[in-house]
Amino acid sequence: MNDLIPLVNKLQDVFNTIGSDQIDLPQIVVVGSQSSGKSSVLETIVQKDFLPRGNGVVTRRPLVLQLVNTHLGSMPPSSVSSDGTLNEAPDRAEFLHLPNKQFFDFEEVRKEIETETARVAGQNKAISRTPIHLKIFSKNVLNLTLVDLPGVTKIPVGDQPTDIEKQTRNLILDYILKPNSVILAVSPANVDLANSDSLKLARQVDPEAKRTIGVLTKLDLMDAGTNSLDILSGRAYPLKLGFIGVVNRSQADIQINKPMADAFKSETEFFQNHPAYRAIAHRCGTNFLAKTLNTILMNHIRDKLPDIKAKLNSLIGQTQQELTSYGDPTFTGKAHRGSLILQLLTKFASDFVAAIDGTSADISTKELCGGARIYYIFNNVFGAALDSVNPCENLSVQDIRTAIRNSTGPRPSLFVPEIAFDLLVKPQIKLLEPPSLRCVELAYEELVKICHNCGGKDLSRFPRFHAKLIEVVSDLLRERLGPTSDYVESLISIQRSYINTNHPDFIGGGGAMSALERASQKKKKDVDRTRRLSAVNMALAGNGSDSPAREENPEKPLSSAMANLSVHQAAERADRERERERLNHVSQHGGPNNVSTSSVNGSPHGPNTGSKDTFMNYFFGGQQQRNDRPILQESAHRSGNIHNVAKEMVMPKTVLDGEPLDFDKKLDHMTDSEEFSGLNEREDMETQLIRSLITSYFNITRKSIQDLVPKAVMHLLVNYSREAVQNRLVATLYKEELFNDLLQEDDNLCAERAKCKAMLDVFKNAFTIINEAM
């Protein structure tokens, strides 16, 4: 049992070497308000004046105080004489921050505490969480581990921070919240216990008062006729560990440096002679307090030691696993570098292939990744882009009519020329090229992303090696990007190079005409239906004014409407018959604009009269032809030859409205709106036919491109890269002259590994210490 407290001190020393607080070691935490006398209690237990004194907050950093009894064998070797007799060693103190220095003058210990406090916490009375570790060796002390905390303050004084009370309370709570801490709550007896700050804080973290021991100071300063017997007896404020009363040196005793032995004697006489405390004098005083704290701490350590051992065992396993994740530096030696490089190369290539194939062990369930994103690009992104392309985009009626006329030259066309279809459909197929090339780029970018995510923690310790792997694979992908894009461009060029109108899915001219005819019939039916409904409405409206007749015979409006409808239809039929007769007359005798041959040579059946007149009408119009007839007759008589008539007609001398006719000027100023100001039925039919053929053939090509481009990307880019990545990495990086540079570890990782290894050694050492003690 006597070795338990030194055991905890050893554990504390071990953990202090790495600054770790992961193990909650048993210790006694001293809590009290300012001027409660807690510093005097500690000095009385140690029997030395070593703590700073003054007004306001004096203790501004936690002081971890380890008391070691030298009488029990914890004496330095210098205390043993040459003849083997034990010399009495002087009391001494050691600071953790000054490991090679011992203090025998405790006045210097006080100065060092003040200096170290000011160094960290500053001169403005602020507090700091960084503790000061002090170890005192003396034959007059019992083995104890105490933590002296700043006193609870209410109002900031001087240049103290405005939230000094909050800072102090938070610091105290950080220590007393630990379940392995025993709370030593110091309260002055001359103040109402209900106002004790130390007991209030202890009650917050230990509501059942199982690990709180109370200390009443200044019992000698209570008003006459009053005492604290009820408190010390546990009746007023029950604590499981009880209350202990002490009488410290007064301020006058401190100023005259009253010896500790005299102070102990005065304290003993006070309790023995006081009428209220005489019966419990053996349970009061500093000596009893020190022995009680020693016993409580040993029992507490004994109860908590199995939990500490289990905690250490768990920490050892966790730390060992963390250290393993940082890698073994011995494996990077010259004898193992080649195998390590090859192992990491293979791991990187395997991760790359697995990410594409979807067989990776770290597949995400939150978002698409790897090969699944490439599939999404092919079927969703690329497909939607192709579907958004309009087969007749940027293709106006004027473009179609121009292509038709240009493809026929000077000859009139009987049918829609195929050359016009070829001219128009090829630029439309070219519209499929941008989305196809973008599909290649998206697949390439996705492969680059996959490359950056490969390697994992195994390569995190070698940042240069990881960067080099990514660079090599990126170069491989970049090399394949060009041929893949070129091949996709060639697919579009192949489709444009030969327009296969014999494709089984192509609608063809007959199919397009049938579709147009069906659409025309449907449109005509809709028009007829509209006309009939309009006629009925007009008939109903015409009979609506005859209200008396409607009242006598309600069926008369309907019959009148039907009669009007029959009249309307008969009028339409008559119009159609007159139009048919007119067309027959024109076909037999020529149109009203045709010039008779008698006007030229007196012959009623002269050759090519119709064509000549039509040619003239093309330039002059029917009305002007009558005005020019005398001129033509005179020219015909002079020449006696029809060819001279044509020659005279096109000469610049020809007069139209009194001015020369300039054909070039007329053609130069012909605008698109004039040229295509109106389409006749044939031209409209040709335009719709061309559009139908372009749409049909474009859809065939689009389906083909939507099928071929993903196949090309998979073959030339994705599959080629996944199959060649291993060989490319080995050929580029598996070179002995590169090993040193590639296996250069990250500096931060090396520091973390060293820290982790030191922590593991500390845990193992602590575990060994506990095993030896149990």
Image (cartoon, rainbow, N blue to C red):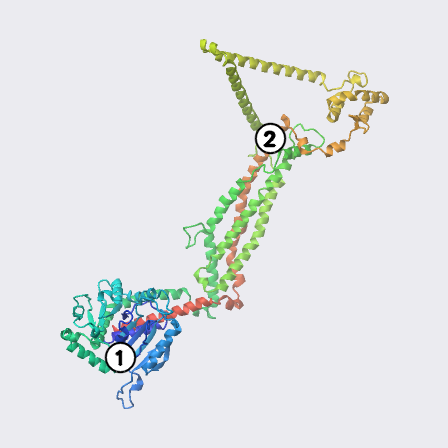
If you read the primary sequence from the N terminus, does the residue marked by circle 2 or circle 1 appear first?
Answer: 1
Q: Residue at label 2?
A: 688
From this view, report whether residue 569 is shown above or below residue 707: above
Q: Which residue is more in the foreground, 39 or 339?
A: 39
Query: Which residue of the protein is positioned furthest toward the right in this rendering?
Result: 638
Residue occupying image coordinates x 44% and y 59%: 456
From this view, report whether residue 203 is shown above or below residue 390: below
Single out the mark in the foreground, 2 or 1. 1
- Tell me if mark 2 has few (under 14), some (14-19) or many (20+) residues whose alpha carbon lies within 10 angstroms of its own: some
Q: Which residue is more in the foreground, 259 or 385?
A: 259
Q: Which residue is more in the foreground, 340 or 598?
A: 598
Q: Amino acid at mark 2?
A: Gln
Q: Estimate the spatial distance between the alpha carbons at disc 2 and disc 1, rounded to whole Å.
A: 118 Å
Q: Is residue 74 visible?
A: no
Label ID, residue 349? none
Instruction: Label 1, secondary structure: give it.
Output: helix
Q: Is residue 585 visible?
A: yes
Instruction: Say which quarter of the image contains residue 68.
Output: bottom left
Label ID, residue 252? 1
Percent of width and height locating residue 2: 23, 76
Instruction: Label 2, secondary structure: give it.
Output: helix
Residue occupying image coordinates x 23% and y 67%: 212
Q: Amino acid at mark 1?
A: Ala
Instruction: Say which quarter of the image contains residue 757.
Output: bottom left
Percent of width and height locating residue 431: 59, 42
- The image quadrant where one finds the C terminus is bottom left
- Tell me if mark 1 has few (under 14), some (14-19) or many (20+) residues whose alpha carbon lies within 10 angstroms of its own: few
